[in-house]
C-alpha cells in the first residue's frame, strides 16, 4: 500500500510498516515511545517561532499570514505567458514561479538547431530582455516576487530580471527574484546542467555574492531536494543531500571572505510533498530543526531570522498516475494537506493532468483553488503546528532527524557532496533505489490507486494542453527582428567584457547585466561561458 | 539474432530534456533481463545517437522522451536511420507519449511505443517480440 512497505498476515491485517526512509512504525504510540526517543519539550520542540523551529518559523504561523502560492507557470511565447501570469494573479496567486522552455534552460536561442521542436514547449522561450519585457508587462515587480526555474544559466536570468526591473522603473533594491540556481541537484536529477561541476558551483557563488551586495530583496538560490526525491531518493536523503548541497554553496562563498551570516538568510529551499503523509510532516519538522542547528553550530549564525528553513514545499508530480487521472485531484489535495500541516511557507501543487503534459488553465486553477480551500475553508490557519505533542508525530520527527543526520554523515564521510556528484556515487545510489521502487510498484509491493500491476489501461480521455509549432516560429521571428534592430557594437563590447571577467574569475554578474541591457541573447551569453568553462561529462551510473 | 547473442540496446536521451530517471531504470531493467545495454547519457544530438548505434552495433535504439517533442525527434531519426542504412535496427520509444501520438509514431517506422506506466515486463517482451 502506498509508498511505504506493508507486511500483512493471511487475514489481511497489517503486521509491519516501514517507511521509505527506513523507519519502522509501531501500531500504537504513547509516552513510552517519546521517552525512549529521548524527547524533551525545550530541546526538541520549543515555542512556536523559536529555535530550533521544529514547530514553525513564525509564532503565529498561518494566523499572521497564509502560505504564498506559486503555481509553476509558463509556456509558448512571452505574450501567452504574460496572459497566464495575469490569470493566476487575478485568481489570488501572490507570487510567480516561471517555467522556461528547455532551450532557454540549456542556454540556446530559439533559432539554434538543438532547440528545434522544443521552443516554448515546457515553458516560455526567452532569448533576450525583449521577451522578459513582454512576459512581465503590467506585473507590479515591487509587489509580486518571481521564482525563476532556471539553473545552469541562472546567473544570466537573474541579471536579466534586474535589467527588466530597471527598464520598467523598479529599482534593483525593490524587486525580488528567486532563481532556482541549484546546479548540483541538476547533476543528480533533472539534468539541465551545462558546465563542469567546479564552474557551475563558481557561478552559484557569483550570484550569491552579487545578491548580498546589490539585490537586497532577492534570494539567489533555491536548493532543491525536490528533484533529488523525484529521481529516487528517500525523504531523508532528499533533505540530507539538499543540506549538503547548501553546505557546498556556503563554503564556496565563505571562501571568498564573506561571512555566512551575511547570506545564509537568503537561501531558500524547494522540497517535495509526495509520499506517506506522516513521513512528510515529520520530515519537514525535522528539517527545520536540523537546518537551524547546522547554521548555528557549523557556521556560527546567531540571528534568529537567518536560521529559518524558508522555502516552497509542494509539487508531488511523481505521485501522479496516468490511469484514472481525476484521482490526481484528490492526491494533490492530500499532498497539500501534508504541506499545510508541515507549516509550508510557500507552496505550489502539481496539477492532475501533469502525468501527460503541462497543465491547462482549468487544471492549474484547480490546483490553486485546492490550496485556497485548505487555508480558507478547512481550518488549516486555526492554530500553529496542530500535530505538535502527538506521541506518534514527535517520535517520528526525532527518528526522521536521526535518518537525515545519518545520510548527511554518509555524504561527508565520502568527501562531500561535490565529489559524490562528480564521481557519480549519489546518482548511482538514487537510480538504483528508483529502480527498486518501480519494481515494487509493478509487483504490487507498493500501491498507487488506479494502477493495477500487470495491467496497463488505455489513457483516459482528458482535455490536454496542446503545443503549437507556430509559437516556435513566432519566437524565431522575434529574435530575427531583434538581431536586425539592436545596437550590434554594444552587444559585442558587453560580451567581450563578460568573457574577460569569466576568464579572470571576476564576478560575472555586473557584466551580465550590461549584456542583457544591450539585448545580447541568452545563447550568446551562455556561449561565452561554454567557451570559457567547457561542458560537463557526466559519470556513468552503473 | 535469435537466442544465442544477447540483444544490444542503446538507451538514449535525445535533445535537451534532462529527466533521465525513466531511461536509467529501464536500462537497469533491460540489463537484468539479460540484454547488453549502452546508456548514451543526456543531451544527445541525433547525429551522436546514430554514431553510437553504428559504433556499438546495436540491435535496438530505445529513446526516452519526456518533453513532448517525440514526434519531430522520431520523424528526423527514422529518416537518418534510413540514410545510414540502419535498416536492421529497431527504434522503440518510451516516455510521456499521449495515446493519440502512438499511431503516428508507428507510421513513421517506430517499432514499438512504451508510454509512461508500461511495465518492465511489457518493455522486455515487447523488445523480444521484435526478433521473432
Image (cartoon, coloured by chain):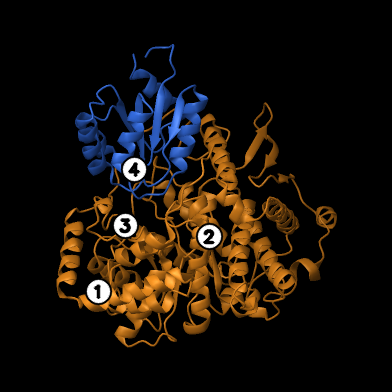
Q: Which residue is painted at 69% across and 64% down in the image? A: A290
Q: Which residue is mark 2?
A: A198
A260 to the left or right of A169: right
Q: CA distance from mark 3 to mark 1?
A: 17 Å
- Distance (Cα) linking label 2 and label 4: 25 Å
Does the CB distance between marks 2 and 1 fall below 8 Å?
no
Label 4 element class? loop
Mark toward the viewer: 2 or 4 = 2
Residue A190: give x, y in percent of width and height. Answer: 45, 51
Q: CA distance from mark 4 to mark 3?
A: 13 Å
Indicate the quadrant containing the N terminus of chain A: top left, top right, bottom left or bottom right.
top right
Coordinates of residue A538 in the picture (x, y in percent): 48, 47
| Chain in blue in the render | B
Same subunit: marks 1 and 4:
no
Label of residue A241 in the image: none
Q: Secondary structure at mark 3?
A: helix
The residue beneath circle 4 is: B14
User: Which of pointers 3 and 2 indicates the residue nearer the eye?
Assistant: 2
Name the spot of residue A373 as percent of width and height, x first: 46, 65
Q: Secondary structure at mark 2?
A: helix
Q: Residue at x 49, y 62 (%)?
A: A199
Q: Give me the chain letter of mark 4.
A: B
> Numbered disc 1: what chain?
A
In this view, the residue in front, A327 or A401, is: A401
Q: Position of residue A175 (x, y in %)?
A: 42, 82
| Tag 1 residue | A130
**What is the distance, in whole Å, between disc 1 and disc 4 at their CAs?**
30 Å
Q: Residue A472 versus residue A415: which sits nearer the camera?
A: A415
Of labels 2 and 1, earlier in sequence is 1
Q: Which residue is mark 3?
A: A103
Amino acid at each position: 500500500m502506498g509508498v511505504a512497505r506493508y507486511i500483512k498476515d493471511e487475514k489481511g491485517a497489517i503486521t509491519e510498516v516501514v517507511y521509505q526512509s527506513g523507519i519502522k512504525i509501531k501500531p500504537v504510540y504513547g509516552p513510552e515511545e517519546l521517552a525512549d526517543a529521548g524527547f524533551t519539550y525545550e530541546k526538541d520542540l520549543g515555542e512556536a517561532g523559536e529555535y530550533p523551529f521544529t514547530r514553525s518559523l513564525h509564532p503565529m504561523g498561518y494566523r499572521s499570514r497564509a502560505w504564498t502560492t506559486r503555481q509553476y507557470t509558463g509556456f509558448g511565447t512571452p505574450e501567452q505567458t504574460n496572459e497566464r501570469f495575469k490569470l493566476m494573479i487575478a485568481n489570488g496567486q501572490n507570487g510567480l514561479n516561471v517555467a522556461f522552455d528547455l532551450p532557454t534552460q540549456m542556454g540556446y536561442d530559439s533559432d539554434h538547431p538543438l532547440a528545434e521542436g522544443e521552443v516554448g514547449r515546457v515553458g516560455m522561450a526567452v532569448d533576450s530582455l525583449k521577451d522578459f519585457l513582454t512576459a512581465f508587462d503590467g506585473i507590479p515587480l515591487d509587489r509580486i516576487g518571481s521564482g525563476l526555474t532556471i539553473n545552469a544559466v541562472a546567473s544570466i536570468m537573474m541579471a536579466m530580471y534586474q535589467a527588466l526591473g530597471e527598464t520598467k522603473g523598479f529599482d534593483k533594491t525593490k524587486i525580488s527574484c528567486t532563481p532556482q540556481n541549484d546546479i548540483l541537484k541538476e547533476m543528480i536529477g533533472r539534468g539541465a546542467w551545462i558546465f563542469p561541476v567546479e564552474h557551475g558551483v563558481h557561478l552559484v557563488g557569483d550570484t550569491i555574492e552579487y545578491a548580498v551586495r546589490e539585490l537586497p530583496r532577492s534570494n539567489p538560490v533555491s536548493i532543491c531536494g525536490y528533484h533529488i526525491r523525484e529521481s529516487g531518493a528517500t525523504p531523508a536523503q532528499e533533505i540530507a543531500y539538499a543540506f549538503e548541497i547548501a553546505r557546498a554553496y556556503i563554503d564556496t562563498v565563505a571562501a571568498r571572505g564573506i561571512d555566512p551570516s551575511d547570506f545564509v538568510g537568503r537561501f531558500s529551499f524547494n522540497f517535495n510533498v509526495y509520499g506517506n503523509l506522516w513521513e512528510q510532516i515529520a520530515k519537514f519538522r525535522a528539517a527545520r530543526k536540523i537546518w537551524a542547528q547546522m547554521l548555528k553550530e557549523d557556521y556560527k549564525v546567531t540571528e534568529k531570522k537567518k536560521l529559518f528553513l524558508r522555502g516552497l514545499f509542494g509539487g508531488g508530480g511523481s505521485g501522479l498516475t496516468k490511469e484514472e487521472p481525476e484521482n490526481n485531484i484528490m492526491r494533490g489535495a492530500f499532498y497539500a494537506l501534508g504541506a499545510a500541516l508541515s507549516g509550508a511557507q510557500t507552496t505550489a501543487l502539481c496539477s492532475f493532468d501533469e502525468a501527460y503534459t503541462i497543465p491547462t488553465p482549468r487544471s492549474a486553477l484547480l490546483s490553486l483553488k485546492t490550496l485556497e480551500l485548505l487555508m480558507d475553508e478547512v481550518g488549516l490557519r486555526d492554530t500553529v503546528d496542530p500535530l505538535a505533542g502527538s506521541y506518534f508525530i514527535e517520535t517520528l520527527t526525532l527518528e526522521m532527524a536521526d535518518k537525515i543526520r545519518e545520510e548527511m554523515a554518509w555524504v561527508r564521510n565520502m568527501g562531500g557532496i561535490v565529489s559524490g556528484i562528480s564521481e557519480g556515487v549519489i546518482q548511482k545510489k538514487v537510480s538504483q533505489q528508483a529502480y527498486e521502487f518501480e519494481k515494487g510498484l509493478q509487483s504490487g509491493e507498493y500501491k498507487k490507486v488506479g494502477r493495477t500491476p500487470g495491467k496497463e489501461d488505455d489513457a483516459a480521455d482528458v482535455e490536454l494542453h496542446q503545443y503549437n509549432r507556430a509559437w516556435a516560429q513566432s519566437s524565431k521571428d522575434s529574435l530575427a527582428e531583434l538581431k536586425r534592430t539592436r545596437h550590434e557594437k554594444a552587444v559585442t563590447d558587453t560580451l567581450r567584457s563578460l568573457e574577460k571577467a569569466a576568464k579572470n574569475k571576476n564576478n560575472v554578474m555586473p557584466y551580465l547585466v550590461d549584456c542583457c541591457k544591450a539585448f545580447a541573447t541568452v545563447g550568446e551569453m551562455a556561449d561565452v561561458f561554454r567557451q570559457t568553462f567547457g561542458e560537463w561529462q557526466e559519470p556513468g551510473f552503473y | 539474432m535469435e537466442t544465442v547473442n544477447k540483444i544490444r540496446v542503446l538507451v538514449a536521451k535525445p535533445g535537451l530534456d534532462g529527466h533521465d530517471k525513466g531511461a536509467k531504470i529501464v536500462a537497469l531493467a533491460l540489463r537484468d533481463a539479460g540484454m547488453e545495454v549502452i546508456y548514451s547519457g543526456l543531451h544527445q544530438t541525433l547525429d551522436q545517437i546514430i554514431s553510437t548505434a553504428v559504433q556499438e552495433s546495436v540491435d535496438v535504439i530505445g529513446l526516452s522522451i519526456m518533453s513532448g517533442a517525440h514526434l519531430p525527434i522520431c520523424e528526423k531519426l527514422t529518416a537518418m536511420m534510413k540514410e545510414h542504412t540502419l535498416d536492421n535496427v529497431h527504434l522503440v520509444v518510451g516516455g510521456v507519449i499521449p495515446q493519440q501520438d502512438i499511431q503516428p509514431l508507428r507510421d513513421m517506422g517506430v517499432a514499438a511505443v512504451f508510454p509512461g506506466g508500461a511495465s518492465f515486463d511489457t518493455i522486455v517482451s515487447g523488445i523480444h517480440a521484435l526478433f521473432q
